[in-house]
Amino acid sequence: MSISAPPRPGRGGASSAPQRHLRQEGPAMSKRGRRPHGLSWVPVSKRRIALVRVLSVIVLSLLVVRLAVVSLFPSANYRLLAAAEGYSVLKVVPERGTIVDSSGAVLAVSEPRNTVVADPLLIQNPIGESTLLGAILGVKAAPIRNAMLSAGQFVYIAHQITAIQAQTIRNDAASLPGVSLVNEPLRVRPNAALAAAVLGSVSIWGQGQGGIEQQFNGVLSGKSGSELLYSAPSGSTLPGGVKSIVAPIQGKNLTLTLDSAIQLRTEQALSDEMVASQARAGVAIVTNPKTGAVLAMANLVAGAPVNSNQLSGAAPPAYAQPHFSFTQQAPINMAVDYVYEPGSVAKIATFAAALSRGVITPSSEIVVPDHIMVGGSLFHDAETHAPEVLSPRNILAQSSNVGTIMIASHLTPNEINKSFMNFGWGVPSGLNLPGESSGFLDPPAHWSGTAPGSVPIGQDEAVTPLQVLDSFNAIANSGTLVTPRLVEKVGSHPVAIKSRHVISASLAGVMTQLLSGVTGSDGTAPAAAVPGFSISGKTGTASIPYGGGRTGYIPGQYMATFVGFTTDSSVPLSTIVVLTQPNQLYGGLTSAKVFSSVMTYALYHLGAVARPVAAPAAATTPSVGTAPSLGAPRGNCNYFPHRFGASVVGASCRAARGMTSATLFGPSP
């Protein structure tokens, strides 16, 4: 056996071969000894790779689609957000509609005005800017400076400044950074305070307050628009930087039924009588009973301070009022807001019910004493008189409380109450002015023991002056009540006329004849006569109740009313005048004078002429011994209204005018 030694390293070829062999074996050895760098050693799933690729493509596609939508079809929200970087969105106030009277004379119109506003974040010198603005506006600088230092980005400095002040601010714009002007129209009435309570007012925010302005606010105000205003970072408007987004819709004009000339005359006549009689408040309404058009509606109060209770429907105070020498517009529309106990003007409801049910006829005769007891209380006529024979026309002409109560005793409480409601008392008038009252009628089930005496003569119920006038308008218009209206047209569209049947035309004719005696020489209101025309109407003088839940009436305080209408005029007119606490007791002495003055002017102004009137079918002069007795006991003037169960006692009248009880009441059955 031969043994060979291991080779040694050297420079010869024999020694290089083993070295090359070792280098070739190096990689194989490294696999067993250590891991290389990187992730090449991790097992890879081809399915995962495919899933990731698919999801990546889907997400990328969605992003591309969304980018295309935002770029090519941006929504309004994105446009506004983008615009907000350099634009301000401003509200464009539409022009408010104008109110004109029946002849086209302007009663209320909006005048362009500017309002000063500021952005506190853009104010650079609050002291200097407030001082400058105060000098321009004529006000103290301190309140302006406080507004400029307030939190937020918008504050009002001054509303509806004059055109000269606005131009001065524009000229000094460089000295007033952060201050700007916005459009805020001012509502003006060219005729000053004429019909102020009827028209109402408009707030600085453009909202109607009271009257026509509030009732038709949506029609008058139109619809606001908007625009984009491009501005620099400093807040100043850039040239040509205004873009309209939504155009405003202008408000519609209103044409009223009011006649400015008649309205002015009515207010003047009412004011003169209020000063003369020292009445604390006054209302006068003029209407056309055929169309329901209100031609004038005046509301005045004494120029001296007046207790606020008088303007809220409550009773006036029971102490002497200071003397006054002028009047002013009432803060509320008392013609529809103010309720009062109307007095004898309410007697038409009792008479209409009695005539329609055959209780009386125009030729009836009734023996009427001067006083009567109902429910333990004394009711009396205005003047003491011996028992006398009166016809229904005489009872109305003399406004006899006792005669009316005697007639009412043959009607049930429900019949009387229904007659009131039929004439429009206790229900809405249909005029629909803000704050309008429906009045109050006590249900018959709640009547007190004295109500059968007080209700028929106009106490124990509360109505508005307009409701009283409406009831007489139904008589003036042959039994048909046309709903009162103040608006003739909205824009160019006429307002529909509504009406309802109240009483028959024949009954309305009889009532007109009965009421014609009121303005005669033997009536309660000869002062209401109108030269050249025939007038039918009624006076009313009613006590004023205490307020605050206290029962009873204020001594010496009264409401004086006269209401009437033309019967032969080519232009039918009706008017009511109500005075609060005049120093002359009766409506025939105060309110009747205003009625005559107003009606005389209105008829002349409208070119009315008197027309012949056909004679009544039946005479209204009483004929002794032919009228129904109304169920009164024979032999004396004691009167017992059997339906109410109240004791009603009159004075003995056996020897009245030399007549026996048989000739007064007819033969006994």
Image (tube, rainbow, N blue to C red):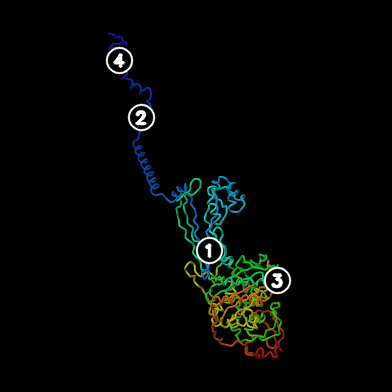
Counting from the top left corner in percent of width and height, residue 448 is at: 67, 74
**Spot occupied by residue 112 in the image (x, y as percentages of width and height):** 52, 59
Badge 1 is on which residue?
109
Q: What residue is pinned by disc 2?
A: 40
**Callout in the foreground (3, 2):** 3
Distance of label 4 from label 2 (alpha carbons): 32 Å
Residue located beneath label 4 in the image: 18
Task: Determine whether 61 is above or below 250 in the image.
Answer: above
476 lies left or right of 659: left
**Residue placed at 70% from the left, 91% from the top?**
658
| Label 4: element kind | helix
Image quadrant containing the C terminus:
bottom right
Report which quarter residue 393 is drawn in. Answer: bottom right
Quarter the N terminus occupies: top left
The amino acid marked with disc number 1 is Val
Disc 3 residue type (three-letter): Ile
Q: Residues within 10 Å of mark 3 (few under 14, many from 20)?
A: some
Label 4 CA crowd tier, 10 Å (few <14, some 14–19, many 20+): few
Q: Which residue is mark 3?
A: 554
For the residues marked 4 and 3, what is the alpha-carbon distance in whole angstroms? Answer: 144 Å
Q: Earlier in the sequence, mark 1 or mark 3?
A: 1
